[in-house]
């Protein structure tokens, strides 16, 4: 039992030490600025300076449309792969795919009911 926990402890130790070593190495070999340059410390080194407020709020509907698109885009990838191997997968995979489609339809109905897909 101690052997199993020892392996997990070793994995956790490596998982903690490796990022610290990588960040430490990057900190040590980073290029040092020779002098304080006003142009280099500005937010934009090239282009036109911003006019007015630089922090703008995006409408949440953009992100909701993107999330719905990603969900149904991944669905089409799964459906395509499922259709290619349909004959080898059998009845179990047929039932599983309808469960998957049902979950997505429930999600679409929920988004539709909440008005997330209406462009206001």
Image (cartoon, rainbow, N blue to C red):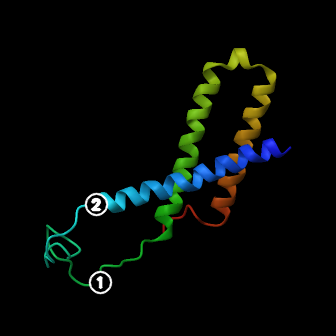
Which of disc 2 and disc 1 is earlier in sequence? 2
Q: Which element is circle 1 on?
A: loop
Q: Nearer the viewer, residue 90 or 42?
A: 42
- Discs 1/2, front: 2
Which numbered circle lies on residue 85?
A: none
* Location of the N terminus (image quadrant): top right
Q: Is residue 38 above or below residue 8?
A: below
Which numbered circle lies on residue 53?
A: 1
Residue 68, x across and y down, in percent: 56, 53
Q: Which element is circle 2 on?
A: loop
Residue 38, x across and y down, in percent: 14, 79
Q: Which residue is mark 2?
A: 30
Asked where in the image residue 97 lies, by quadrant, the reply is: top right
Question: Going 35% across and 62% down the picture, which residue do you hit?
Answer: 27
Q: Is residue 5 above or below residue 24?
A: above
Q: Nearer the viewer, residue 80 or 113?
A: 80
Question: Going 81% across and 26% down the picture, which residue do you hit?
Answer: 92
Asked where in the image residue 115 lies, by quadrant, the reply is: bottom right
Q: Is residue 51 above or below residue 83?
A: below
Marks 1 and 2: CB-CB under 8 Å? Answer: no
Asked whether, in this view, residue 34 is left or right of residue 96, the answer is left
Q: Nearer the viewer, residue 29 or 99?
A: 29
Q: Is residue 97 above or below residue 29?
A: above
Question: Going 14% across and 70% down the picture, which residue do you hit?
Answer: 34
Q: Residue lying furthest right in this view?
A: 1
Question: Going 45% across and 71% down the picture, which residue do you hit?
Answer: 59
Q: Residue lying furthest top in this view?
A: 88
Q: Nearer the viewer, residue 117 or 38?
A: 38
Asked where in the image residue 17 lies, by quadrant, the reply is: bottom right
Alpha carbon distance from label 1 to label 2? 33 Å
Q: Residues within 10 Å of mark 2 (few under 14, many from 20)?
A: few
């Amino acid at each position: 039992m101690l052997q199993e926990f020892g392996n997990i402890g070793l994995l956790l130790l490596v998982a903690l030490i490796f990022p610290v070593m990588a960040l430490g190495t990057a900190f040590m070999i980073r290029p040092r600025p020779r002098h304080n340059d006003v142009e280099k410390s500005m937010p934009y080194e090239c282009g036109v300076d911003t006019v007015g407020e630089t922090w703008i709020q995006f409408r949440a509907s953009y992100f909701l449309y993107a999330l719905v698109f990603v969900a149904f885009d991944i669905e089409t990838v799964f459906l395509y792969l499922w259709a290619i191997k349909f004959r080898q997968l059998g009845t179990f995979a047929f039932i599983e795919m309808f469960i998957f489609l049902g979950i997505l339809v429930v999600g679409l109905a929920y988004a539709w009911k909440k008005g997330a897909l209406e462009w206001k």
